[in-house]
Amino acid sequence: MKQFAFETIVIGTGAAGYNAACRLKQFGKNVAIITEGVNCGTSRNTGSDKQTYYKLGLGGDFPDSVKGMAENLFAGGSVDGDNALCEAALSVRCFMNLCELGVAFPVNRYGEYIGYKTDHDPYARATSVGPLTSKWMTEALQRQAEQLKIPVFDGYLAIEILKHGDVVCGVLCIEQASGELTAFQTADIVLCTGGPAGIYEDSVYPACHTGSTGLALAAGAKAQNLTEWQYGLASVSPRWNVSGTYMQVLPRFVSVDEDGTEREFLNEYFEDSYEALSSVFLKGYQWPFDSKKVMTGSSVIDLLVYRERVLKGRRVYLDYTKNPFGLDEIQYDRLSEEAYAYLSKAEVLFGTPIERLEKMNLPAIELYRSKGVDLASEYLEIALCAQHNNGGIAVDLWWQTSVRGLFAAGECAGTHGVTRPGGSALNAGQVGSLRAAQYIAQYPNKAVDAEVFIQLIGEKEKQYTDETTLLLAGQNNTVTIIDSIRRKMSGCAAAIRNREKMQLLLDENKRYLENFFHHAGAVDRKGIFLCYKLRDTLITQCAVLTALIDYAETVGNTRGSALCYDGNGGLRAGLEEVFRFSEEDGSTKGKIQETMWNGNGFVCSWRPVRPLPESDELFENVWRSFRENKNIF
């Protein structure tokens, strides 16, 4: 078994991971990065029509403040106030760091970073460099890491956080190419592995990104808000959000059954074609599914797509080549006032959806063309997909988890609540990774004695040998199991949730985990890599399902991004009973649900949110504390 030693290990090569490593190196730490694949991950491989970065306002004449931004982040519900204040306070420092690294956020001729409003944003704090904002961020930070000569161990899957007592002392990895075990001794770990992307089949996460949330959960780290996600309409291949102008240009929604019969299904629900078109338009900037927009809003579009795809078993497509409902010309003045005004201002009151899209956002067409899909001639298959986990591993105001020496930043950290402003996740990843690096540089853990570490990894090597022997003797069924549990998860535990089916899936997953190394199998040592990824997925699914079931039993009503069935609830006319629900009254916004492994299974508890701190604004007091390093760390 190969062994390496570093003061700090960062796991993940997305925007948060690279930033954590660069900051640690700048602060004088001996740091290395471990990654399954440098070119994998959500930061590098996703975007939207105009991917948003959210930060404090830096242009225009509207008033803004750190406290104001923190209050808006906190208002999302089930958010800890200290995390919200940190994300607001450090947003400018982190944003300007990206600008200095060459990420070309647009400015006007005077140097103002003029912004625009995004969802859940009362001010124009949002900015963007186009469809690939997070990709440009990642690549800029990667260049910096290379200039700083930070070693990167590419092709390594972290399978266990090693602890001495209750404190981190290392991480155990499998090398993908050989299936061999590698041990890294370290006193501090920053986990930047993204959200738990691998638990769903209908997903807009890149296929190469599955996440490693189970790694932290198995180490004893608490999770929080695992029930809170963003789901929205996305293309299936390639995986990409169909938000913004993809909706605002009014494409056709078409479903195809197993016999090949096409139907334009929106007009089977809407009696007024122009009401349907106005709802489609609104999906552009009301992209995430929102339970509050079901009864009288645009989220009914999500439910109609889900009905066609899941309940009726049909494939669903967007068609940009023709206008909806057989309209040769759309009577734009019959749209909602908001839709008409927007499209008129954009000067697209003409033509077909593809012609309107070409006028409004040509890069959105070129993006799909670069991925092998020509929207001018092809249908685009879509589904209601998982896009982002607002919850994740619980962290304190320095982004340290409940396990000493283990930090989490980026999407794997659960700093968001029920709702959040669009683009705030990119800011949170930069802030969280900076905060973790600052704390580690100031208060590093002490490395465990070499003799103790050697004894520990010797025991782990024997355990791994026994496990792999069983895997190599088992059935080659890992892919089959992964596909099955992801499909079931999307069917009952995503935007539409069913209590009974979630319990059945949880029970099934527990059986897999109880005798995992007898259930799963690999053909050769390279296949062992996938077996351990399956194990991480099962652990994560069990945690999420436990949280969903606990929420159903303790709260029961619908809130935010998912619809929980309630037989006594309301139902929008024309929809099936499965969509009957009652909206939560807001009483849980001041609470956070935590989920933790107790040795026998996952358990949940609820706690009050940490309130927004009242900061000391007298400069002399802050200056003195800063000089003396009091009340800072």
Image (cartoon, rainbow, N blue to C red):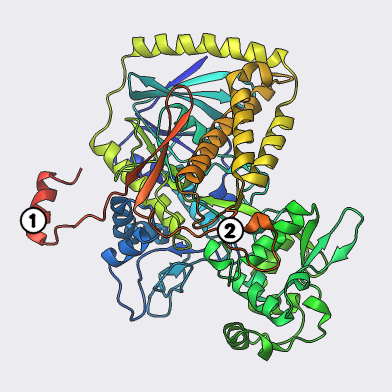
- Which element carries disc 1, helix, strand or loop? helix
Q: Is residue 121 left or right of residue 508?
A: left
| CA distance separating discs 1 and 2 | 43 Å
The amino acid type, in three-letter code, at marker 1 is Asn
State the count of labels: 2
- Which element carries disc 2, helix, strand or loop? loop
Q: Residue at x 29, y 46 (%)?
A: 397
Give the camera-side residue of 190 and 136.
190
* Residue 193 visible in the shown view: no
In this figure, which residue is indicated by the disc labeled 2?
Answer: 47
Disc on res. 621: 1
The amino acid type, in three-letter code, at marker 2 is Gly
* Residue 205 visible in the shown view: yes
Q: Quadrant of residue 482?
A: top right
Give the camera-side residue of 201 and 547.
547
Q: Where 256 falls versus 474 (above or below)?
A: below
Give the camera-side residue of 243 and 276.
276
Instruction: Pinpoint residue 420: horizontal percent, then vertical percent.
Output: 44, 59
Q: Is residue 530 left or right of residue 269?
A: left
The answer to whether the residues at label 1 and label 2 have Cβ atoms under 8 Å apart is no
Instruction: Pinpoint residue 391: horizontal percent, then vertical percent.
Output: 45, 47
Q: Is residue 206 left or right of residue 122?
A: right
User: Callout 1: 10 Å neighbours few (<14), some, many (20+)?
Assistant: few
Between discs 1 and 2, the one toward the N terminus = 2
Instruction: Pinpoint residue 308: horizontal percent, then vertical percent.
Output: 76, 58
Q: Is residue 589 left or right of residue 319?
A: left
Instruction: Pinpoint residue 320: horizontal percent, then vertical percent.
Output: 77, 71
User: Callout 2: 10 Å neighbours few (<14), some, many (20+)?
Assistant: many
Q: Residue at x 58, y 68 (%)?
A: 295
